[in-house]
Image (cartoon, rainbow, N blue to C red):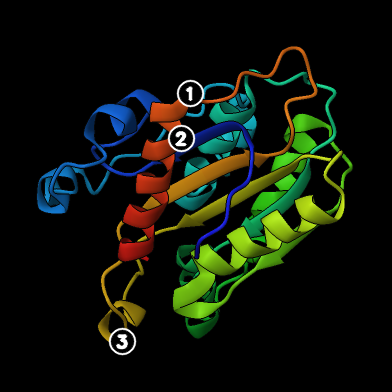
Amino acid sequence: MDFQFPLLGWSAWMPGLESRAAWLSGASEPLAEVNSEANSAAVPAVKFIDAMTRRRLGRLARLTLQVAHEATCDLPPDLPLRLVYASRHGDLHQTVNLLSALAQNEPLSPTAFGMSVHNAIAGMWSIQRQDRSAATAISAGARTLHAGLLEAVLQWQEHPDQPVLYLYADDAVPQPYALQTAPVIPQALALVIGNPTQSQCHLPDEKQSVDVAACIRTLGVLS
């Protein structure tokens, strides 16, 4: 994929690379060192979300909301952002828990069922930001990262005066499905695609733009 688009903000998360600063200083480190098993249980704190809501969030939701918050924190809070959310597996942990409950004839949790829906995290972000802009949810197998990015860029190109927030996230696949797929490292990416027409927006400098491209390539390898 070789095209250019303007960035108003960005963030990415992976165990060992849990902030923009970490990516800018360590995105070129060997993957074996950056993504050790010791870091596989890391989870963002998402302290900007109220405690009652935080208790309902699984790791995938926390990853996604954390990068979305960091990527948009310098933007005007009332700036409408169309949303493209992409995840290959969605919150499969919630689905497995629901299936296990069904197999044991246990009642299902309405909250868990709601969070298992593929676009539930996109809805939570819209509620968190109080933004009623259009949202698109995508799952495209091994090409999910790139398919979602292509959709976000095409939406921006169609209406370049309206920025688009692209969110990509995936989590480790739980058993028994982990036996049938390649290992997945918990990962999330947020890109705000749009022209710098807002006075409060700060574009990444040239070095950051290069490292964002490296970040996308890294996550593409791991997807």
CA gap between label 3 and label 2 equals: 36 Å
Marks 2 and 1: in contact by CB < 8 Å?
yes
For numbered disc 3, what is the local secondary structure?
helix
- At horizontal 21% and vertical 42% (from top left) the residue drawn is 28
The local crowd at label 3, few if under 14, some if 14 to 19, many if 20 or more residues have their Cα within 10 Å, is few
Tag on residue 209?
A: 2
The quadrant of the image that shows the C terminus is: bottom left
| Residue 153 visible in this rendered orientation of the protein | yes
The local crowd at label 1, few if under 14, some if 14 to 19, many if 20 or more residues have their Cα within 10 Å, is few
Left or right side of 97 for 24 = left
Marks 2 and 3: in contact by CB < 8 Å?
no
- At horizontal 70% and vertical 51% (from top left) the residue drawn is 122
156 in relation to 145, above or below: above
Left or right side of 85 for 79 = right
Depth check: 160 or 123 in front? 160
Depth check: 158 or 144 in front? 158
The kind of residue tagged 3 is Gln
- At horizontal 31% and vertical 64% (from top left) the residue drawn is 221
* Res 71 quadrant in image: top right
For numbered disc 2, what is the local secondary structure?
helix
The kind of residue tagged 1 is Asp
In front: label 3 or label 2: 2
CA gap between label 3 and label 1 equals: 42 Å
Q: Which residue is mark 3?
A: 180
The kind of residue tagged 2 is Ser
Residue 187 on image: x %, y %: 39, 51
Tag on residue 205?
A: 1
